[in-house]
Amino acid sequence: MSLTIEPFAASHVEPVRGFNRRLADAGSTFQFPDGPVPAWLPPAEGASVHQEYFVVRDDSQVRGGYILKPQLFQVGDSVLTVADYRLPISEGIVDSKYGMVGMLTLKDALRRRPLLYGLGMGSRREPVARMLQIFKWRMVPCPFFFRAVRPARFLRGIAFLRLTPLRRIFLDFLAFSGLGWAALRAAHAWTSRGIPASASWTVVEQFSSWADDLWERSRPAYSLAAVRTRDVLEALYTVEGWRFVRLKIMEKGEVIGWTVILDTPMQGHRQFGELRVGSVVDCLALPGREVTVIATTTRFLEERGVDLIVTNQLHRDWCAAFRRNGFLSGPSNFYFAICPALDTRLAPLDPDLERVHMTRGDGDGPINL
Amino acid sequence: MPTRDQIAESIVSAVRETLRTKGIQDLSPTQNTPVDRSLGLDSLDWAAVVVRLESELGIDPFEQGVEGELRVVRDLVDLYEKALRQSA
C-alpha cells in the first residue's frame, strides 16, 4: 500500500468512481464527489470562499478523499483562514486493509490548513467524530431549536417522533383532541410574551453595503465567526437551484440584522416527513438585537405558512434569542468540533465557546434542509 | 533520540496494547507483521496507536505526509526513525 494524497484532478475521475462503486457494493451510503470541480463554491480567482477536493491515491486506485472549505474567520481580534474539514471518506470503512486512510486524511488536512473545524457529524459516536476526539479535537453540540407553527400538522407529521405505533397513536390523539395544539401554542406563547413587533423585514435579492456595515458593527460580539461580508454572503447564498430567502431586518430606519432562510416542503424526510419546514440557516444582528431579528423572522415564516421552524445555533445570545421567541430545544445531532491549534487560540478568549457563531450556513450547505 | 530498537519496541508495544484493548490476545505483532486487514485494526485503532506513539516518542510523522510503502510494522519503524532523525 503506497498512499499519496493530492488534489482531485481529471485523471482521478474514473478511480473515484471505482472507489464509490466499491463502497456501494459493500453496503455503504457514503460517496465522494466524482468530479474535480465542486458544483457548490468552486475555486475561482478572487473567490471569497471555495471548496477544495483531495483524494487518497494508492497507485492507480483511489482509497479515500476529503474536502476543505477555507475562508476568513474573525478569531478574537485577528482575521485568519480557518477551514471546514468535510466529508472524509476512507475505503477503510468497508475494508480494514485501508484502516490507516482515515487518519492520513486528517493529518493531511491539518498540514494544508492548520486551523480546522468540523460541523455536523451526526453524533459523537460516528467514526469521524470518534477519530477527531482521539486526536484531541474539542466537540460541542450546536443546540437544535424548533417552533411548531401548526401544532396539529406538526404532531401528525414529525417523523422523528412517530417511530412506533404507540407513539403515533399518542401523537395523533394529541393532534385530534386539540390538547397538543393547546400545549404547544401555550408553550410558545408563554416564552415569547412581551416581544414588541417593532421591526420589519424586506426580502432582498442581494446583500449590499449595509451587510458590510452590519458585519463591522456586530463582529466584536464573537470570539469566532466566519467573516460575513457582502461578498462572502453572496458566494454562500446565491446558488442555482437553492431557494434561499434573504431577509433584511430594519427598525426605525436602521438595519439591525439579517437572516437567511429556507422554506422547504419535505417529502418523505427522515425527521420531518411531509412537513413544510422553515429553516433559519444563518443570521447576524447588532449586539442586543438578536431577539427582535428572530421575532421578525418568525413572523415572516408564520405568515408564509410553514408548519415548523427549525435552526441550529451555538452562540449563547442567539440560543437565548430563539428561546425568548418561544422556540423549544430538541435533540441535536449537529456537532461543532475544533482542532487543538484552534482550541488553543480560542481558550483564552472564550474557554466555554459561548461566543462562537456557528450556524447551518457554516457547514456543508443546508443539504438536509 | 531513541535507538531504532527502542522505536521498534514502542511501536510493537502500542500495536499489541491496542489489540488487547479490542480483546485480541493471541496475536504477537513483530516488525514483519503486515499492517493490513489481517492485523484487525480499523481506522480508530490506528488513530489510537499514533496518539500513543506521539505521547511516547514525542513525534507524529504523519503530520508531514507519508511517502513510500506501508506494508509491515517495519515500514512504520522506518517512518518514525526518519521523522525523529529529522527533528533532532
Image (spheres, coloured by chain):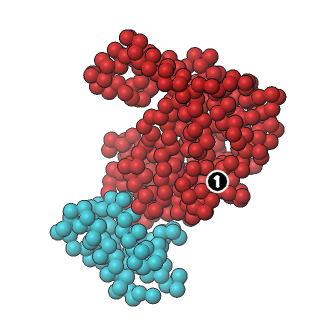
Chain colours: A red, B cyan
Residue occupying image coordinates x 68% and y 53%? A74
- Give the residue number, with chain letter if any, for mark 1: A223
How many marks overall? 1
Dividing the picture into quadrants, the one containing residue A174 is: top left
B26 in relation to A164, above or below: below
Q: Which residue is outermost to the left? A: B26
Residue occupying image coordinates x 26% and y 77%? B30
Q: Nearer the viewer, residue A236 or A215?
A: A215
Count neighbours of disc 1 (C-alpha within 10 A) and say few if under 14, some if 14 to 19, many if 20 or more: many
Residue A11 horizontal/vertical position (percent): 54, 52
The type of residue carrying mark 1 is: Ser
Q: Nearer the viewer, residue A144 or A132?
A: A144
Q: Nearer the viewer, residue A191 or A368?
A: A191
Q: Chain of mark 1?
A: A
Q: Secondary structure at mark 1?
A: loop
Residue occupying image coordinates x 44% and y 41%? A333
Would you say residue A123 is visible in this rendering?
yes
Residue A27 horizontal/vertical position (percent): 33, 41
Residue occupying image coordinates x 18% and y 68%? B25
